[in-house]
């Protein structure tokens, strides 16, 4: 019997259900794990995603034929049963479970195993074969605990605010930007946001996701009236002329990046930021290993990231591991969003 899921030049394909998972070229039916640009592409005739991911997908893709499904709900498509399960990556992100005659495959999309207080926490799904990312598939990648991350972020902001400096931090508009907002101590001062970040905030607030009050940065905003604010920007906004307006006379802004890549000193130096916060919406090395073990799968397919290195590690641990080629981008410190270069 053929594999339940196969890897094609359009995306991950299920012949028994005649659908693709996170396809990057136009197809008739796309099951989409989440709304980041490298997983949710334009041009599909029909989409299926979680009800929580749907508002962001409509915001980003426009008028699309989009059906929704709740976490844990089953749907019969052709000769298979599919269900979506929390991936913990960003709000609404899902692992997609596909079952045929007792055989179960799971395509995890992007995932992280820590509870960030924003996304529905990751849930292991027992399966025979597991498709995993490996964006941070090296032992050097281990994320700062949430409480420590909040303390460090707020201490940096408070020190800058005491000197009348803006604290500019670059982060993806969907996911990390909102995590920063949930970690921020709003008693320190106001929070300003880049337009792309605020557009996503508005979509998430409209569906009932709680976020602190923020102020959209517009050309006519009186920045002097908000001196000392935390400013959540996209990476390209932080690196371009948009950010220079926050260098008030005598008080240059302090800049920071929030990314898993901040664990590497060379990346921190290259970004020339004052601070680097080790923070990602992808699983770190312990998270990847724990997630794979908890599935019970013996066959593992490794997609984007440190694929060859991680495959060899999995083989040494007794798994049947394979590297597969996709167009998923993972996390890029030079991008405004996954799959979108700055």
Image (cartoon, helix red, strand yellow):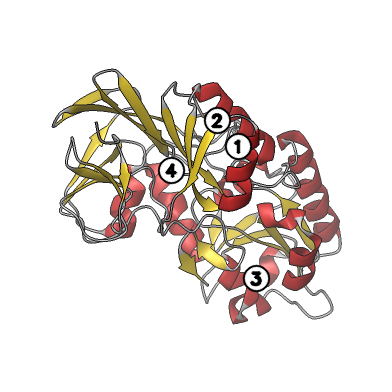
- The image quadrant of residue 325 is bottom left
Q: Position of residue 111 (x, y in %)?
A: 51, 39
Instruction: Name which of mark 2 and mark 3 comes first in the sequence.
Output: 3
**Relative to residue 12, is residue 94 drawn left or right?**
right
Separation (CA) of disc 1 from disc 4? 18 Å
The CA span between labels 3 and 1 is: 51 Å
- Where residue 73 sits, quadrant-wise, is top left
Number of the front mark, 2 or 4? 2
Identify the residue under disc 4.
109
Q: Position of residue 223 (x, y in %)?
A: 65, 70
Splitting the image into 4 quarters, where does residue 31 fall? top left
Residue 191 location, x and y as percent?
A: 63, 55
Circle 3 sits on which residue? 223
Chain-order first, disc 1 or disc 4: 4
Picture coordinates of residue 188, whole percent (x, y): 75, 48
Give the distance between the C-alpha atoms of the residues marked 2 and 3, in whole angstroms. Answer: 48 Å
Identify residue for label 1: 314
């Amino acid at each position: 019997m053929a594999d339940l899921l196969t890897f094609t030049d359009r995306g991950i394909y299920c012949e028994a259900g005649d659908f693709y998972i996170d396809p990057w070229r136009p197809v008739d039916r796309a099951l989409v794990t989440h709304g980041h640009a490298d997983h949710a592409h334009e041009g599909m005739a029909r989409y299926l995603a979680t009800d929580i991911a749907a508002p962001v997908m409509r915001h980003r893709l426009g008028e699309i034929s989009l059906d929704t499904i709740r976490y844990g709900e089953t749907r019969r498509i052709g000769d298979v049963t599919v269900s979506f399960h929390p991936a913990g990556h960003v709000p609404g992100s899902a692992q997609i479970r596909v079952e045929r005659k007792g055989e179960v495959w799971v395509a995890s999309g992007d995932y992280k195993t820590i509870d960030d207080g924003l996304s529905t926490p990751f849930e292991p799904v027992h399966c025979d074969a597991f498709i995993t990312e490996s964006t941070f598939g090296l032992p050097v990648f281990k994320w700062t605990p949430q409480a420590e991350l909040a303390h460090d972020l707020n201490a940096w902001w408070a020190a800058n605010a005491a000197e009348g400096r803006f604290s500019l931090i670059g982060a993806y508009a969907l996911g990390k930007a909102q995590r920063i907002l949930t970690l921020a101590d709003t008693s320190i001062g106001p929070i300003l946001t880049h337009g792309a970040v605020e557009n996503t905030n508005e979509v998430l607030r409209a569906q009932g996701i709680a976020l602190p009050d923020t102020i959209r940065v517009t050309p006519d905003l009186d920045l002097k009236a908000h001196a000392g604010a935390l400013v959540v920007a996209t990476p390209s906004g932080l690196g371009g002329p948009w950010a220079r307006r926050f260098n008030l006379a005598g008080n240059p802004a302090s800049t920071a990046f929030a990314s898993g890549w901040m664990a590497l000193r060379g990346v921190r130096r290259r970004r020339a930021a004052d601070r680097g916060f080790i923070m990602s919406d992808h699983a770190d090395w312990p998270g990847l290993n724990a997630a794979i073990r908890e599935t019970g799968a013996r066959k593992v397919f490794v997609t984007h990231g440190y694929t060859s290195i991680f495959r060899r590690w999995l083989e040494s641990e007794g798994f049947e591991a394979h590297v597969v080629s996709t167009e998923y981008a993972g996390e890029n410190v030079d991008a405004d969003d996954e799959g979108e270069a700055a």
